[in-house]
Image (cartoon, grey):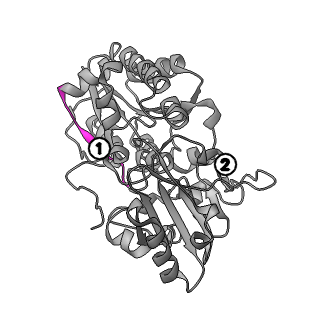
């Protein structure tokens, strides 16, 4: 039996429209029960903060845990459970089958496999080519963002994220609209969020270091826990400054697991036979197949991976709702002909083609609750 999205759990894509509806912005539906008449609000995304991880390390995040205890809510992030898809869900209010950011890397017709975070070919060979001119992000993700719609509705919108992401391909694709405010550390992130809420506007804020340390040291490791303490202080500094009518919604784009079982695609000729390209990441692989080889490749991957992964055809994954209820025509070719979603502690790596990614301890992308469920932590006055 293939896992299917739990329709009783709200989706990450529901958050921004619901917050804007709580602010009274016209044209937005409230999918979540939030306090209304909000005079200023922020959706703060902590990259990699899974619900199970937060609960397991509550002592390192007393502020978040206390708020979570008042109104315990979870969201699911959909497939794949990865940053490109999660940020796109926040920015568009859509599932991956609609916004088209179907992986950390995926096949873009004409361009080959691209890295969605860097908007460059993947894996990099030779010159690190920038694809933004030939494949404009606004065209590759054509849906208007929630931020653009909010601006049209008269809401002041700020997108507060790392200065290094200013004008990046992913920023242009899924976070365009409003004023982009590039920040450098927790201090100016907190300051800009506080200023926006106090001014009665809406902002999206992003913090990425927890995810980075989870990848490098493992989720729940001592470095990860020390960073979670810093995140908790960030939240506290925002909560204590909330004015009457202010709202803070803390979410994440995915959880994370520690892997202990590695399958190296590059070391097994059977896994590359009939395959023209490979995308995704270690917990969620897109396998693009030579014409006529679909059945053989599917059977080979199913046999080789066995219980270590759900290995399905594109049609099976779409029918199971992995990418949401709707898959747009322009998204279909970005999805692998065969999809492998890792189970347990398995990672499907590529040491030759992805040496850095293959060395990581923490991974995400698949369908486990540890990767799929993220907290919705609310604070308001």
Q: Is residue 79 above or below residue 313?
A: above
- Element type at marker 1? strand
Mark 1 surroundings: few (<14), some (14-19) or many (≥20) residues within 10 A: many
Q: Which residue in the structure is indicated by mark 2?
A: 355
The span from disc 1 to disc 2 (Cα, nearest Å) is: 32 Å
Number of the label disc, if any, that sits on residue 75: 1
Res. 26 in view: no
Give the image location of residue 211, x and y in percent. 49, 35
* Residue 104 or residue 312, whichever sits in front: 312
- Element type at marker 2? helix
Give the image location of residue 197, x and y in percent. 39, 23
Is the C-beta separation of discs 1 and 2 under 8 Å? no
**Residue located at (48% from left, 17% from top):** 191
* Residue 145 or residue 248, whichever sits in front: 248
Specify whether 76 is left or right of 151.
left
Residue range highlighted in magenta:
70-78
Is label 1 or label 2 in front? 2
Q: Is residue 3 above or below residue 271?
A: above
Figure quadrant of residue 328: bottom left
Res. 306 in view: yes
* Residue 42 or residue 312, whichever sits in front: 312
Give the image location of residue 276, x and y in percent. 63, 73
Figure quadrant of residue 237: top left
**Residue located at (24% from left, 21% from top):** 66
Residue lying at the far right of the rendered structure: 126
Specify whether 294 is left or right of 182.
left
């Amino acid at each position: 039996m293939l896992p299917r999205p739990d329709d009783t759990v709200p989706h990450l894509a529901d958050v921004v429209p619901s917050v804007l509806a709580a602010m009274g912005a016209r044209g937005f539906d409230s999918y979540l029960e939030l306090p209304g008449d909000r005079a200023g609000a922020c959706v703060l995304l902590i990259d990699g903060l899974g619900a199970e991880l937060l609960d397991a390390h509550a002592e390192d995040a007393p502020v978040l845990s206390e708020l979570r205890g008042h109104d315990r809510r979870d969201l699911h992030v959909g497939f794949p459970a990865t940053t490109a898809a999660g940020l796109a869900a926040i920015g568009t209010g859509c599932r991956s089958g609609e916004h088209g950011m179907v992986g950390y890397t995926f096949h873009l017709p004409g361009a080959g496999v691209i890295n969605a975070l860097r908007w460059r070919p993947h894996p990099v060979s030779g010159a690190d080519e920038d694809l933004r001119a030939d494949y404009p992000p606004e065209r590759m993700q054509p849906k208007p963002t929630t931020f653009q719609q909010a601006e049209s509705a008269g809401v002041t919108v700020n997108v507060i994220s790392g200065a290094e992401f200013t004008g990046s391909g992913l920023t242009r694709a899924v976070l365009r609209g409003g004023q982009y405010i590039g920040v450098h550390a927790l201090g100016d992130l907190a300051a800009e969020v506080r200023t926006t809420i106090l001014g009665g506007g809406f902002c999206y804020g992003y913090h990425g270091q927890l995810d980075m340390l989870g990848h490098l040291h493992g989720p729940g490791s001592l470095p990860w826990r020390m960073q979670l303490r810093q995140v908790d202080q960030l939240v506290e500094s925002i909560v204590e400054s909330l004015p009457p009518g202010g709202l803070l919604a803390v979410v994440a784009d995915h959880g994370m697991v520690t892997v202990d079982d590695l399958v190296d695609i590059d070391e097994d000729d059977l896994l590359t036979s009939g395959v023209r390209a490979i995308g995704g990441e270690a917990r969620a692989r897109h396998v693009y197949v030579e014409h006529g080889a679909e059945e053989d490749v599917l059977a080979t991957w199913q046999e080789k991976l066995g219980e270590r992964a759900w290995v399905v055809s594109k049609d099976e994954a779409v029918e199971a709702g992995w990418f949401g209820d709707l898959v747009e025509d322009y998204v279909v070719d970005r999805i692998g002909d065969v999809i492998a979603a890792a189970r347990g502690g398995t990672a499907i790596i590529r040491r030759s083609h992805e040496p850095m990614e293959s060395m990581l301890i923490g991974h995400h992308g698949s369908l486990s609750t540890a990767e799929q469920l993220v907290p919705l932590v609310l604070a308001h006055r």
